[in-house]
Every structure is written in structure tokens, then in C-alpha cells.
Amino acid sequence: MFDKILIANRGEIACRVIESARGLGVRTVAVYSDADRAAKHVALADEAVHIGGPQPSESYLRGDAVIEAAQATGAEAIHPGYGFLSENPDFVEAVEAAGLVFIGPSASAIRAMGLKDAAKTLMEEAGVPVVPGYHGADQGDALLASEAEKIGFPVLIKAVAGGGGKGMRLVERAEAFADALASARGEARTAFGNADVLIEKFVSQPRHIEVQVFGDGQSAVHLFERDCSLQRRHQKVIEEAPAPGMTEEMRAAMGEAGVRAAEAIGYKGAGTVEFIVDGSEGLRPDGFWFMEMNTRLQVEHPVTEAITGVDLVEWQLRVASGEGLPKRQEELSIIGHAFESRLYAEDVPAGFLPATGRLAHLQFPQGARADSGVRSGDEISMFYDPMIAKIITHGPTREVALKRMARALRETQVAGTVTNLSFLGALCAHEDFAKGDVDTGLIGREIDALVSAPEGTGRHLALAALCALDLLEAAWPTGVHLWAPMTRAITLKSAQAGEVVMRVTSLGAEAHDMRIGEEDARIEARRAGGLWRLDGALAPEARRIGGQVFVFDNYGLSFDLIDPLERAAYAGAGGGLVEAPMPGLVKEVFVAAGEAVSAGQKIAVLEAMKMEHALLAPRDGTVAEVLAEAGAQVDAGAALVRLEEEEAA
């Protein structure tokens, strides 16, 4: 076993690797960027080395700096985590040339699966079923359109070097193909430096089921399947293992196909073979096809660990250090069911826009596993993926595991940034998902029902008022006798209720009466046994941080404290100002001053959180000013384009 390893990554996966390495007595070295000087993974590691600026290209993607850090600290091996350099064969070769061990597959195995078209050809030769499509080298527009016609619409255009949904477009009719092809190529060129695409038949009721494989370079085993069908824009949201509705016959067929895929390329370490499954007539052994192989550990690996009792990172370290496979196939079995929810800092009602901000408070419930790379007080940076944590639950049955997940989400406390907690909770409560009736289109079909901002009630306003006035913890002052109860007024503001004046009458340290706004509704707050109750119902937790109060109920509610003497009047720009919804890089600007635009027209593209976001004209009008140019780094709220004022009717 190694004595010391370096982790070429950040965030929750770096923390995860450190945990398993520590359990084996292996010392760890973290690397960090300027933005991550005080990050959790840096604090957890035995040593840490600074490798560059906040942009990934200045730090985590600098293979030379990572290798130098490993050599300088005496690390014997490098664990890549996932993302960044994890599937870069040139980096693998550089690591080995430096006399270090790469904790993962060989460069040749990564190359074999790195391009989707070549990988599909290889899989066909290995006897793995492949989706009908075109994977050829001829990338002419006319040929691709012709091949799409042969396959039959709908089809998927996919970047051959793609991942994470980038460079992927669904085309449902022939006349939309040309525009979709241009768009997919442009995104692929930006994301991967390779504009080549492949065309695949689109399965109308698809499920995304993947098989966890593990090899030692010669033989391989599978650790069963995961269902990752709950997706939004091709990004996984909630994963589970095993797949609902899976039959033993199909499980055996998929597992064998996964093992054949791994052994065909001499795979070493943890990998995932992803299949598209036709769920229209149930799960059938002849209804799944190879999509791609991820030659690394997957984000959703904890659900496999939960149902098998296997520490996959430990296996990675053991096999990379020279051991054989820790278990034979017949020694592996499924125990219960597990779910993983991806908790992100994102504004769901605003179209799932990634969010930034300082985590003023972060607390996970007991009874659930939470893999996180951040703590209370940490910053969600604009430079990296805005994941806060992965929340994992396990139970003897799917129903129990899902109920535990629903409760864990309700009890997770986050303050300081908007999150997708309520969206995850709505998914867990969705009737079809609860029944196991899932496919990759579920979220798209049900988006209106699933996307809504958490709503507060009078009880939440009352609790926020008590917290704002420091009445939840403060003892009643002694030595003071009031001839009458004291009443104070405080103004709270929330996105749903707007501004509300709360009048709080204190009857003692453990009794307060409150009246809400103009409705004058009354709520009684009483404390007994150290617990507050509002109109008899147990109150949730609340916390004041600066000028806000956070009530940890309904997946998190926030209230601004309004000082009447310091109101900030904001009249807006009459719907004529296009602003950056988050910090990012202005990728393109498509309009110029004096140009007429229509409502909904794309006028700029902002790149942030590793994704491109189209900014649209809010109304018909004429461009008065272009306030930012391509290549500019802008803050959230920065004005980018201003339209001329509308003439009065």
C-alpha cells in the first residue's frame, strides 16, 4: 500500500478520497487554487500545495503543476477524482513518466473510450449492444443530415468528445436539424476543443441505467446497476441503486455486458458503463444499448457503496498499489436500496441558474450520509461547479430509502444562498417517481409542478420576527418591572409575501403574542421545556445572520429585515435592461446599438459554472447601448445591454 498520495482535485471528491486514504493509514496531499486557500479539502489533507489561480486552466487543469507538487511532497501516486484531469490520457502518461502511479485506468483504456464513435465500434466488436446511429469520420453537413433521415427522427446529436450534456441536441424533425447541428458543434468546440458529432436514434421513453465495473487490468467484476434517469438538461439530479423494476435476467445481461466492455480494454480501477434503456414495455434483456463508458469514479458512486458494502475508493487504492480484485463476482450481492440527491446552489424558479454566495450556515441531518466539500462560512465560487453536497440514504426497501431521503432533505439546513432543496423534495414526493415509474423525460414533463419557490406562512413570519428581535434565546431582563407588556414592530420582507409589518407583544421571557400586517392575524408563541410552540405547533429552527433571518422549514425560508430609514428605492429599468444573472464571462454579444430586437431574441451568451447561458431580450425594442463586450468578466447584476425607453401610449 502507498505511504502518501496526492489528490488532483477539489471539493467533495477530494474530501471523499482523503477519508478512505486515512482509513488505510495513507497520508494525503491536497492541491489548491487561489480561490480554495481555505477550502475544506485543504484543511483535511496532511499537506497542501498551491498550484495557481482560480480558473481551472490556471490550477486544477495544470498537469505539470500537479506532478511537480507530487514530486516535491514525496507522494507515490496521484488520485484524479472525477472531472479535471481524470480522463486525460496525456496526463496519465506524464504521471507515469515522472515515476508516479496513476490511480485509475491506463492511458490506452481512456483513449479507447474517450471518443464516443470509436468506443461504440469497439463495443460492437466486443459483443456489447449499441444504439443504432452514425459514428463515422465524415462530418459533412449533408451526410449527417442524410444519416439522420436514415435513422429516423427523433435523433440525438452528440459531441463525440462530450459529457455532462454539452454538445448534445435533440432533433425531432428534419427541418430543425441544421440549426441544432450548428449549435451542438459550437458548444462542443468550446467545451472540448472538438466539434465532431455522432447521430443516434432517440429512444422515446428512455431510462439511463449504468453498471459499476471494477477491473485489475486483466479481469473485471460488476457491482450491479444504478438508475440515473432523473435528469435535467442531461445532468443527473437523483440517482438510485438498484434500478426499480430490474429483473434478474436483465441484471445479469447488463452486468455481463459491462464486464465485457471493461475487459475488452484491459480496464484497471473503477469505471462506469452507461446504457440507454427502452422503458416503454418494462425492462427486457434485449432493450438496452451501450452509450459510453466513464473511465473514472462517478459522482453517484455512494449509492453503489451503500448497497454492496464496498468502499470503492479503498478498492482503487488497493488495486493501484498492486493488489488483485478484492472480491470475486460471486462474493458481491445487493443489500437494500439507496438514493443520492445532488444539492446545488442554484435558483430553481429562475431557470436553475447557478448561484454563488457565502454559506452562512450549513447543517446536515443525522441518519443520512452527506458528502460535501464545503462548510459553514465557505464561499460557493463562480469558478467551479456549485454543488454543496451529495445526500445519500439507504434502507431495506426502496420505499424506506426514499422516505429517509425525503426526511433528510426536509432537515437539511442551508443559509446564505438559494438551493434546489425544494425541487429535490418535490421529486421525492412525485407520484410516478415514488412508484419507480421513471424515465429521462419525467422532469421535463412535470417541470411546472416541480418548480416552485418555498412558501412561508404566518407561523414562519412570527418565528422570524422573534428571531430578529433576539427573543428565542435571550432571557427576560431581571430587576425590571413593566407596568404593561412591551410591544415592538419589525418589518420583514420575503419573495412571496413582500413586506410585512410584525407587531410583537412580549408578555415574558417565554410568552409573546404577534400580529401580522394589515390582516392583524394573531399568533401565540409559548416556550415550554426549552421548546418553542407557535399556536401549539412545534416551531422549526431559525437563525439570524446579519440582515436576514433564516427559518429552516419548507426546505429553507429567508426573510430580509427592513429598516424603514434605510430603504433602497429601485425603480428598475422598465424591462429594458439585460443584466448578468450571475458572475461569469461574456462569451458573445449578438447585437449593436441602434439594432431592433424582438422579445425572446438571443442577444448575448454568458459562460458561468462551466455552462453557457443565453440572455434574451425582455421585450421588443431598439438597442440603446451595449455595455459589455465579449471576453469581459462581469459580476452578478452587471448591465450588459440597455434598450431604448418605450414611448408612452
Image (tube, helix red, strand yellow):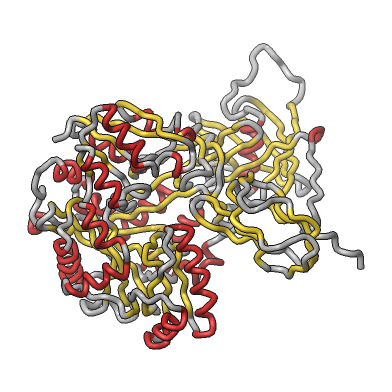
Q: Please give the name of the residue rendered at 54% of the width and 34% of the height, measured from the top-left corner.
A: 360
Between 126 and 97, which is closer to the camera in this rendering?
A: 97
Q: Is residue 322 left or right of residue 33?
A: left
Callout count: 0
Please name the residue shown 73% across and 56% down the image: 641
Q: 327 or 553, which is in the foreground?
A: 327
Horizontal relation, residue 578 to residue 551: left or right: right
Q: Using the image, determine if residue 533 lies above or below residue 638.
A: above
Where residue 604 appears, as percent x and y from the top left, is 64, 59
Quarter of the N terminus within the rendering: top left
The C terminus lies in which quarter of the figure? bottom right
Is there any visible trace of residue 232 in the rendered image?
no
Q: Which quadrant of the figure has residue 477?
A: top right
Task: Classify 421 as above or below 251.
Answer: above
Q: Kindly tell me whether residue 373 is visible in this rendering.
A: yes
Direction from residue 421 to residue 47 in the image, left or right: left
Residue 430: quadrant of the picture: bottom left
Rendered residue at 31%/52% (across/down): 87
Q: Residue furthest right?
A: 649
| Percent coordinates x, y for residue 448 in the rendering | 56, 67
How far from the left and from the top, in percent, is residue 198?
38, 73
